[in-house]
Structures are given as C-alpha cells and as structure tokens.
Image (cartoon, rainbow, N blue to C red):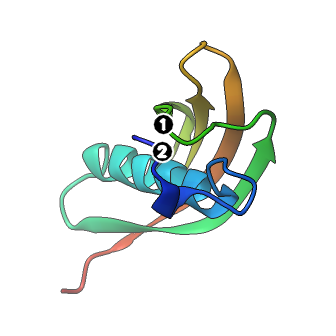
Amino acid sequence: MAVTPELANRNGVMHGGAIMALADNLGGTATMINLPPGKTTTTVKSKTNFLRPIRIGDTATARAVPLHKGRTTMVWQTTITRPDGKAAAVVTQTQLVIEWTG
C-alpha cells in the first residue's frame, strides 16, 4: 500500500488507523478464503503493536499468517513492514465464523 499524504498523520507518517485498516482487510480476506460454504466472518478483536513509522512516499507491505483456523474462530497475525524490511506494526486479529443469512 502506497503511503500517501491522505493516509498520513500530522507527523508525516502512516496513520495508525490506516495501518489497522490494512491489517483488518487482509485478515478478513484470509478468513473468507478459508471458510466453508454458507459461512461468513466479522472481526471481533484486533490488537496492534506499533513498532516503527512508515513515511509518506514509502510502501507498506502486509503479510498475514494463521495462528488458529477453527470451526468458530480464526486468528491471524499480520505484520506490516517498511521498504527496509523492518516491521512497522504487528496486528493480531480474531475473526468470528458465522452463518451467512444474506
């Protein structure tokens, strides 16, 4: 994800909310890919550790790995890295697996 001024805070670095949104989207998508037919998901818990800033003009890269893929919940850990390869944030997210009624 390109870090643009629209995604930055007043200090010129990627806003924590933008980092969390990127991780939430990735964790939710990873869960959807792993769901059985007739199921959907929603995030029920998300915890973020902010480690380093990502500056405007840089690219944030996200990688999610499953910590638990169960019948009723899935837990994903997403690491957001900077162009220098250093971790900028680590997000642990719990997804609830629910019946799709739509």
Q: Is residue 19 above or below residue 98?
A: above
| Front in this rendered view, residue 52 or 68 | 52
- Residue 51: x and y in percent read 81, 35
Residue type highlighted by circle 2:
Val
Look at discs 2 and 1 and give the one toward the viewer.
1
Residue type highlighted by circle 1:
Gly
Whether residue 73 appears in this view of the structure is: no
Sequence order check: which comes first, mark 2 or mark 1?
2
Quarter holding the C terminus? bottom left
The residue lying at 62 percent from left, 38 percent from top is 55
The residue lying at 55 percent from left, 42 percent from top is 56
The residue lying at 61 percent from left, 31 percent from top is 79
Q: Which mark is residue 3?
A: 2
The residue under label 1 is 57
- Residue 34: x and y in percent read 31, 43
Label 1: few (<14), some (14–19) or many (≥20) C-alpha neighbours in 10 Å: few
The reply to whether callout 2 and callout 1 are in contact (CB within 8 Å) is: yes
Quarter holding the N terminus? top left
Q: Is residue 59 above or below residue 24?
A: above
Q: Is residue 59 above or below residue 20?
A: above
| Front in this rendered view, residue 35 or 13 | 13
- Residue 2: x and y in percent read 40, 41
The residue lying at 68 percent from left, 17 percent from top is 86
Whether residue 87 appears in this view of the structure is: yes
